[in-house]
Amino acid sequence: MLEQLETMLQEAVAELNAVTTSDALREWELKTLGKNGAVTRMMRGVGSLPAEQRAAFGKRANEVKAALTEGYAEREQLIKAQELARDLESGQIDVTLPGRPASLGGLHPSTQTLRRYREIWAEMGFQVYRSREVEDDDTNFTLLNMPPHHPARDMQDTFYTTTPNVILRTHTSPGQIRAMREFGKGGTEPIRIILPGMCYRFEQITTRSEIQFHQVEGLAVGRGIRMTDLKGTIAEFARRMYGDKAQVRFRASYFPFTEPSIEVDVECFLCGGKGCRVCKYAGWLEISGAGMVHPTVLRNGGYDPAEWSGFAFGMGPERVTMLLHDINDIRYFWSNDLRFLEQF
Ligand code: PHE
């Protein structure tokens, strides 16, 4: 038995010295010092020895175990140091190499237009109010005079969520309600704001319409605000945005939350009014829905419609960006194609 013990020690030491990786070291430890390893097995055998040899064997076995445990620890340190050195070597960085030039990003064409809008409206005295993109059904519809079952609520148009009553806003108009309630101070303060932001509609994607798009809502509430104020304000905006000669026209229209309602067109820049794919051969491009804030909406915002009035408009900057840059397909906007984006 003692002889076997010595042989085992010699073999184990030889094996240990041949180990060069942490994986192999772990294997060696299991095989030699582990629960079912060679040392443990030897020690278990002590019971089969004659009583007078047991003490001497046990003593030597403990020495062997201690020696192997120590050898293991030393080897472990050595291997760790080697592996670290190897890692450092292979990950070496040549700090003298010239850097890769960082390519400059640019603003998305939509962002550029949004910023231009904001500038113009700021010049005209409108402050920015940010309303939420995730809305509740009431604010997006009911409070805007679209009761349940109103056709404008058609399932096709709205992205619903798994939470009842929670939807993605289909337009920025719900922000009118939130702004009136927040800043109107119970219907006692005038308001003049724009509400820019992303809107979502569950619609067929075409060259002219996307399922997500920006709107810039405008809202003015005060005493004695009239339709002529709306027309003058939008015409002034068009001149600042498209130049002094910009032609605009107003068409009667319908929105549940404005009365009367209009739509505003600007002469198509792409074709100069002759008709093209973008303007659907009409020569005019719709830039805004608008109207006088409906009395019901004013009331829902906390105002007394007998005393207060207001106008509202909603514009789509993507459409305008298409005009300004001769873009003939709205799908480029969110396709993240650098060949498109790098042009701006
Ligand atoms: N919210 C309307 C839309 O999504 C636009 C609009 C805004 C119309 C404000 C009138 C007044 O098309």
Image: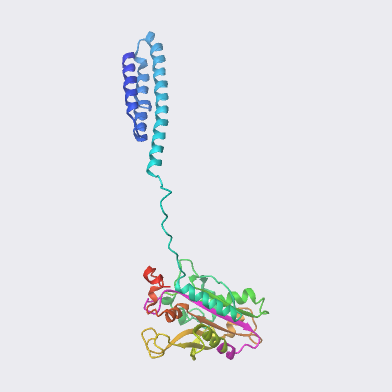
Q: How many marks?
A: 0
168 vs 229, nearest the viewer: 229
Residue 222 on the magenta span = yes
Residue 222 picture location, percent across and down: 64, 84
Residue at the image point whose x is 55% and y is 86% from the top: 236
| 204 up-or-down from 306: above or below | above
Q: Quadrant of residue 276?
A: bottom left
Q: Quadrant of residue 228?
A: bottom right
164 vs 188, nearest the viewer: 188
Judge from the rendering whether residue 332 lies leftward or rightward of residue 135; answer left or right. left
Judge from the rendering whether residue 238 lies leftward or rightward of residue 284; answer left or right. right
Residue at the image point whose x is 38% and y is 72% from the top: 340
Residue 141, visible in the rendered structure: no
Residue 317 on the magenta span = no
Residue 90 picture location, percent across and down: 37, 43
* Quadrant that contains the N terminus: top left
Q: Residue furthest right?
A: 188
Residue at the image point whose x is 32% and y is 28% from the top: 18
Residue at the image point whose x is 47% and y is 87% from the top: 266
Residue 122 picture location, percent across and down: 59, 78
| 253 up-or-down from 49: above or below | below
20 vs 95, nearest the viewer: 95
* Quadrant that contains the C terminus: bottom left
Q: Residue furthest top?
A: 52
Q: Quadrant of residue 80?
A: top left
Asked which colour scheme the image uses, the reply is: rainbow
| 171 up-or-down from 235: above or below | above
Q: Which residues are magenta?
A: 203-231
Residue 112, visible in the rendered structure: yes
| 143 up-or-down from 244: above or below | above
